[in-house]
Image (cartoon, rainbow, N blue to C red):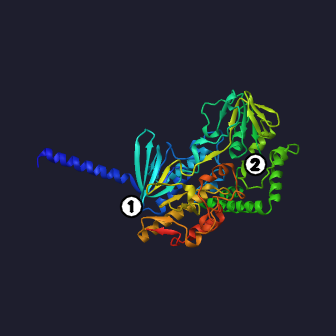
Amino acid sequence: MTTQSQDQARTQAAESQAAESQAAANHVDVLIVGAGISGIGAAWHLRHQTPQKSFLILEAMDSFGGTWVTHKYPGIRSDSDLYTFGYRFKPWVGPPIATAEEILAYMHEVIEENELARHIRYGHGIHSASWSSADRRWTVTGTTKAGEPFTVSANFLWMCQGYYRHSQGYTPEWEGMADFRGAIIHPQHWPRDVDLAGKRVVVIGSGATAATLVPAIAGKCDHVTLLQRSPTWFYPHPNSNELADRLRQLEVDESWVHEIVRRSILFDQAEITRRSMEEPEAVKAQLLEAARAYLGPDFDIDTHFTPRYRPWQQRLAFLPDGDLFKGLAAGQASVVTDHIRRFTQKGLLLESGKELEADIIVTATGFNLCITGDIDFTVDGKPTNFADTVTYRGMMFTGVPNLVWVMGYFRASWTLRVDLVADFVCRLLDHMDAKGAKQVEVALRPEDRDMPLLPWIDSGNFNPGYLQRGMHLLPRRGDKPEWMHNQDYWSERTELPLIDLDDPAFRYS
């Protein structure tokens, strides 16, 4: 063989090897969608529970963090305590309610300590995901931030992208919005250059976002008004944990502090949830008494802070150190409970006839539900409508093979379910290997086929606006425990580890 031929052969071999390496790099055992709190948690569990599995995280943004990166409004913080919102495997050492910066620092430590960065591809937005039963794999396509197309295939797809549309918040259409001469801002798209100094600000909303924003900007603007259509139940409490502080004084190891405080908080949360359902009037009285302690006897609590629904029928909003109530008591903020008739040039005309003047109106009115991350799914060439499927414990869906979705809890921290679902996924993957199975999907058993199919969640039990607006997008549920997401961490922490993976509801091939 001539030197030239040898060079050509070596070049061809190198190109072939490079092609094989690239193909291998673009195929993994498990593909995780999203590098938020769920995706990073899923990656940790895969690395520690199934170290033989290759995995990759695709993240559309330029950084990990999900919610804590997309939301940049003033005061952005958790509305769950970090002892339960934090992972069970990583002790939390800060205050119970944490800022976005503190949560991102915590997630960064998880990534660094477990060498997860090499498994993450940032700036990779997914457009489609197609399952092939012939190939027993998912093929995912999308575009990078640089506009380059990409394709990744995987044996198993783990959807950790969250449950709302990051690119667009929910703002109702009010008459006259185009007439308003000031700025209209949704918290999900907070401008970096907004100047609040000397401005009159109205924040429309009554949930956790509004309760965070108002105290964060009170004192930084001329005045801020919380405009709510109806009140929310607020729970003011010091942003500290006496038990954690005492254990640290006793020099208890942080891993034990984390576990003990976590269990204590979960016990207290279960108790208030139970009492909210069994003795709602007593819980109402307790919450109203706490509000009066901050606002004083002359404040109109009946109008502004006494909701029409019982506690925990919608999320109970935590006020660290009672900050919202403190701002109201100090006169830096005010609250108006009324309906909007229309926007005007100067502000808002209310149904009462009062005009609320403003320079900036913030629409803290919620978000848009998005269960699939705006990804087009197909199974064997047929488009998949998740609303036509039936959920298996809020994790898997009939007719959709090798896919698990993470949806957290409404009455408990989201991350509690991340850990439980991860345990299930890792156990399922090991079980498939033991059976020699390449495909698994859930299907209704013969005895399930006559059960009624109901909306994904009982709206009489929990009915926030974003769920009511998006219920038609969600899978159906049955009337048996296997075919619903019961939203009860305290039962699922026992039930999910005991799932029989050889139950006829699972079909392997």
**Alpha carbon of mark 2 to alpha carbon of mark 1: how far?**
52 Å
Query: Residue tagged by mark 1?
Result: 134
Q: Secondary structure at mark 2?
A: loop
Residue that sits furthest to the left in the current view? 2
Q: Nearer the viewer, residue 154 or 171?
A: 171
Q: Secondary structure at mark 1?
A: loop
In the rendered image, the vertical position of residue 401 relative to residue 25, given as above or below: below
Residue 397 in picture, x, y percent from top left: 54, 61
Residue 38 in picture, x, y percent from top left: 55, 54
Q: Is residue 29 visible?
A: no
In the rendered image, the vertical position of residue 8 relative to residue 351, given as above or below: below
For badge 1, the amino acid type reads: Ala
Query: Residue tagged by mark 2?
Result: 232
Q: Nearer the viewer, residue 86 or 177?
A: 177
The label on residue 18 is none
What's the residue at 55%, 72% (across, down)? 446
Which one is closest to the eye, mark 2 or mark 1? 1
Left or right of residue 120: residue 466: right
